[in-house]
Amino acid sequence: MVEKLLKEEDGKLYVKRMKLLDEGELKMLGPQTVEVLKEVAKERSYPKDLSKKLDMHEQKVYYHIGKLRDAGLVEVYDKRMVGGAQCKFYRPTSEAFGFQLTDDWRRAKMESFDAPEEVLNFFSEFVDGGTFNGSVVVGSPKQHGPFMTSARDGHYAVQLGIFLGNFCSLENRYVVKLDTEVKAEDAVDRHLMLIGGPITNTVSMDLNEDLEVKFDWERTWKIVSGRTGNAYREENIGIVAKVREGDRVRVLLSGLDHKGTKSCIIGVTQQHEKVLEGFEPGEDFYRVIKGLDLDGDGKTDDIEVLE
């Protein structure tokens, strides 16, 4: 059961996701189990690393992690090779845990957006702790790059920003960058959301070569899937992808044309339960999206997941 925990300070409201524990879950939270949970909350980690940090035998750490997993308080969010072995990295399933003494509730003075679980999981690295952690990269509106094109899809990031703003706040910095700025500053040390394909976004072009579903412009522009072998050429088709580069995450919302990018944005912000179905934390994720015009007004208003 997940609720919102509100705090008012200096006239401002702050929100945190809190899971209410039942009596059985409370009983199993001994001091050492809580210690492991607190350490996982500080920094996503794996049992062997936790053992060193807590000066606790590794088998004991596995024991407490097992208890926390059984109670639904931690989950695996990534799997990586460390020192030649695959390690499971854990994170808490909520930002806070608590219990209630009675079933009495007071009506709140304001209503808040209840972020769907699939959205929180997909963007987990970007909204860690309720604050946006990363950069949104849009193509420059000036002619640039090897194809000397100007971006026409950067404004679609506004739709994504309003959507994400429902469940995270901003750091005290400017989070939107042009692709030319990222290239000039070599500012790739953050998690990145890339809006637009390699025709107009040169950062997307750098990422494209390593994608399993990618853009291909050898003869004609198309999207080619290394998973199914299919090729897509319609301008209203795009890719929604989440991949890892080292310890950083890249989310790609990109179309063959600006119409395809719009289709991806609509998919993530309005049809996320369909687009993000099957997403598994720690694994590369791809969806090929096709925009649809259901009301016949010439504008994309719905989407279809092709793969």
Image (cartoon, helix red, strand yellow):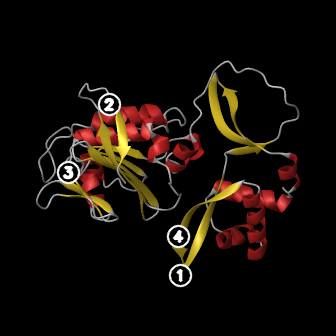
- Crowd tier of the residue under label 1, counting other residues whose Cα lies within 10 Å: few below 14, some 14–19, many 20 or above: few
Residue under numbered circle 3 = 233
The residues bearing labels 2 and 1 have C-alpha atoms spaced at a distance of 51 Å
Mark 3 secondary-structure assignment:
loop
Q: Which mark is residue 84?
A: 1
Tell me whether the residue at label 4 lies in contact with that at label 2, contact meaning CB atoms closer than 8 angstroms: no
Q: Is residue 155 above or below residue 146?
A: above
Q: Residue at x 27, y 46 (%)?
A: 237
Residue 57 visible in the shown view: no
Would you place residue 264 above or below residue 294 in this image? below
- Give the residue type at disc 3: Arg
Q: Residue 287's x, y, as percent?
A: 38, 52
Q: Is residue 255 left or right of residue 274?
A: left
Three-letter amino acid code at the position of disc 1: Gly
Quarter-of-image position of residue 12: top right
> Image point 52% across, 44% down: which residue?
119
Q: Bin the neighbour count of mark 3 within 10 Å (Cα to Cα): few under 14, some 14-19, many 20 and up.
A: some
Three-letter amino acid code at disc 2?
Answer: Leu
Q: Residues within 10 Å of mark 2 (few under 14, many from 20)?
A: few
**In the drawing, what numbered circle is on residue 294?**
2
Determine the secondary structure under disc 4.
strand
Binning the other alpha carbons within 10 Å of mark 4 as few (below 14), some (14 to 19) or many (20 upward) gives some
According to the image, label 4 marks what residue? 80
Q: Earlier in the sequence, mark 3 or mark 1?
A: 1
